[in-house]
């Protein structure tokens, strides 16, 4: 089969490699045609994974039409702020009636606050299926073929199983789920919690603080998810607690790294301006806060994070306020 990956960042490049390693013909689309030509010739995406050589079965292209033509699966791995625009461009080329669409982007649309699958559903009502992949998947570790697991969610279980077969190999193990909103919501909210995990590390706090954050962050995520119609069990699996552990504790997590830098005195503008990677947790925090308020869900960690990011509250003050909240039952 021809499978195409739309987005040539670190995660998109690694997903293309997984598919190529599994024997598929893969097209990897990069927005910048000059960059696409450089990667195609050098077989290396130097901006993101300079020590990583592409599988020969991957064709890198700057032509969206070339990438999507005849593809059985389109894997979208673009920043959340650009998903709607890219989806519209693809929709001008094809209606995807015979194509499975998979989003691997963990974030909300900035203008509408919709999830990525909702953006795809709007643009491709005739698609064969729309799915989401999310889990504890740090791109650099998977590029090194270290073992990793993830979740592929689709309302059509047979299509989730089809995608599972496309991606599954000796170092990457996807599980299936029909809880599309739960799996996708986990991927969005965990980025916010990971920012706080980085802040705790930046202040020099240890494992007790991280364990408390992950546990209470999971409680907040679960409350919101269940209110929105997700399955409670989803939050205690790979997409939920699994991804929380990885992103809150690993130095490879861009959200954790951003939180660490904030706690060490760097400004938000310095952090976002100093990386080519999108820090999705920053963009997601106002959306999660709004969802919590609209649905009357208590999310004190998210509330304090919002105040740190957008109201210039000191990290130490936010942590103090969290610790001094009224006593509660677990």
Image: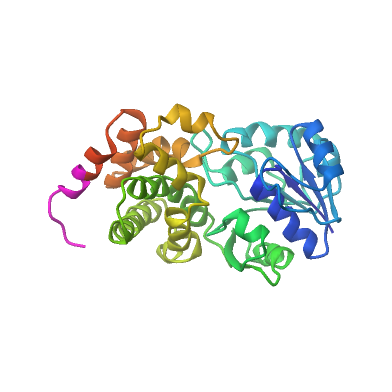
Is 110 above or below relative to 129?
above
Is 281 above or below relative to 144?
above
Q: Which percent across, then down, holds residue 267?
A: 40, 29
Position of residue 287 in the picture relative to residue 204 (left or right): right
Residue at the image position 69 percent from the left and 55 percent from the top: 15
Q: Which image quadrant: the N terminus?
A: bottom right
Q: Which percent across, then down, holds residue 281?
A: 46, 41
| Magenta stretch, residue numbers | 320-330
Q: Which percent across, then down, holds residue 86?
A: 69, 34
Residue at the image position 48 percent from the left and 47 percent from the top: 188
- Could you tell me what secondary structure mostly forms the magenta stretch? loop
Of the pair 228 and 140, the residue shown nearer to us: 140
Position of residue 324 in the picture relative to residue 310 (left or right): left
Is 3 above or below relative to 307?
below
Whether residue 99 can be seen here: yes
* Residue 17 sits inside the magenta stretch: no
Q: Which percent across, then down, holds residue 279?
A: 51, 39
Whether residue 175 can be seen here: no
Position of residue 158 in the picture relative to residue 188 (left or right): right
* Residue 322 sits inside the magenta stretch: yes
Residue at the image position 80 percent from the left and 38 percent from the top: 36
Q: Which image quadrant: the C terminus?
A: bottom left
Of the pair 145 and 292, the residue shown nearer to us: 145
Residue at the image position 33 percent from the left and 49 percent from the top: 200
């Amino acid at each position: 089969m021809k499978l195409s990956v739309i987005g040539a960042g670190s995660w998109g490049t690694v997903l293309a490699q997984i598919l190529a390693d599994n024997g598929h013909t893969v097209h990897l689309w990069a927005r910048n045609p000059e960059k696409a030509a450089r990667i195609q010739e050098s077989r290396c995406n130097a901006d993101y994974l300079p020590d990583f050589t592409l599988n020969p079965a991957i064709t890198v292209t700057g032509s969206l039409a070339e990438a999507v033509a005849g593809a059985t699966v389109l894997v979208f791995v673009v920043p959340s702020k650009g998903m709607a625009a890219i989806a519209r461009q693809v929709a001008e080329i094809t209606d995807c009636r015979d194509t499975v669409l998979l989003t691997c982007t963990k974030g909300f649309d900035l203008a509408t606050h919709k999830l990525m699958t909702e953006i795809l559903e709007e643009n491709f009502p005739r698609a064969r299926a729309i799915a989401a992949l999310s889990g504890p998947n740090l791109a650099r570790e998977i590029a090194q073929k270290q073992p990793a697991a993830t979740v592929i969610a689709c309302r059509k279980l047979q299509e989730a199983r089809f995608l599972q077969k496309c991606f599954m190999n000796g170092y990457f193990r996807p599980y299936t789920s029909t809880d599309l909103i739960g799996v996708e919501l986990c991927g969005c909210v965990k980025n916010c919690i990971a920012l706080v995990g980085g802040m705790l590390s930046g202040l020099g706090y240890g494992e007790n603080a991280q364990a408390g954050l992950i546990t209470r962050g999971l409680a907040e995520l679960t409350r919101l998810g269940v209110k929105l119609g997700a399955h409670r069990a989803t939050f205690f699996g790979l997409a939920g607690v699994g991804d929380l552990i990885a992103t809150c504790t690993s130095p490879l997590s861009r959200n954790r790294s951003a939180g660490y830098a904030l706690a060490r005195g760097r400004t938000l503008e310095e952090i976002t301006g100093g990386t080519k990677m999108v820090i999705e947790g920053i963009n997601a925090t106002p959306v999660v806060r709004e969802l919590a308020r609209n649905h009357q869900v208590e999310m004190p960690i998210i509330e304090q994070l919002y105040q740190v990011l957008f109201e210039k509250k000191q990290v130490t003050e936010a942590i103090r306020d969290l610790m001094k909240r009224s006593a509660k039952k677990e």
